[in-house]
Amino acid sequence: MKKLLSVLVVFVFVLTAFGATALADYYTGYTTLKYGMRSGEVTNLQNDLKNLGYFGSTSTGYFGSVTKQSVIAYQKNYGLYADGIVGHATARSIKVERIVQTGKWYLGVPYVFGGSTTKGFDCSGFTQYVMAQNRISIPRTTELQYGKGTSVSKSSLKKGDFVFFETYKPGPSHVGIYLGSDKFIHASSGAGKVIISNLFSNTYYSQHYIGARRMLP
């Protein structure tokens, strides 16, 4: 019995360690990346820039001149200080754009209550999955997600913020990701799939909106 318990403890430890590693990268680890560095975080950065259309080479894990120029091009396009160094501001901007891009990849995926895979999502399953694809861990349910991050006022909403609604029961029961310009993406039970909706110009969502949380500090 003791041997079995020991094996289970080791298994849980390994599972936890590998899970944490799988979701760790330059953004979640607050790692500054710059010319001359070589690491797995640089590979993650290169893959993110490649998905966003800024890096056209093979991801090698080495931060060379091509990666630096890709970072500078991104920084210039997004109004960031164009020094080719990936500090927190640049890392956060890249992550926000990747989260939005990732969410849009799954437009049309069916709504499935309790679903958390590309075969079908419910609202919080969708948001959790999108974040996990970008190596960011958040809780599974809407209620628990509402307790994470920092509260954001309606006037301060930014792309990538989570928007919450009170629908079929008291408290937060629906969640989506804000895209900017009065749009958010979500797994809608009414539409039966992942869609983009208006946030405040849509009467239903405007009336049921209860707040927003910024998951990326």
Image (cartoon, rainbow, N blue to C red):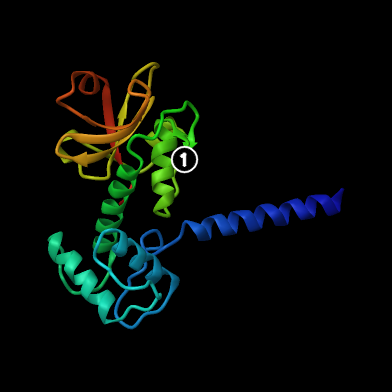
Q: Is residue 111 left or right of residue 50?
A: right
The one nearer the camera, 67 or 109, is: 109
The one nearer the camera, 132 or 47, is: 47
Q: Secondary structure at mark 1?
A: loop
Q: Which residue is tagged 1? A: 139
Above or below — where is 140 with respect to 83? Answer: above
Q: Position of residue 201 (x, y in %)?
A: 14, 25
Residue 147 visible in the shown view: no
Q: Is residue 52 left or right of residue 4?
A: left
Q: Position of residue 26 (x, y in %)?
A: 38, 65
Q: Is residue 182 left or right of residue 187?
A: left
Name the outermost residue toward the bottom.
36
Q: Position of residue 119 (x, y in %)?
A: 47, 36
Q: Quadrant of residue 193?
A: top left
The one nearer the camera, 45 or 66, is: 66
Above or below — where is 119 with respect to 70? Answer: above
Above or below — where is 214 with respect to 69? Answer: above
Q: Quadrant of residue 128?
A: top left
Density class for disc 1 (Cα within 10 Å; few <14, some 14-19, many ≥20) is some
Q: Residue at x 17, y 68 (%)?
A: 73
Q: Residue at x 41, y 28 (%)?
A: 111
Q: Residue at x 20, y 29 (%)?
A: 199
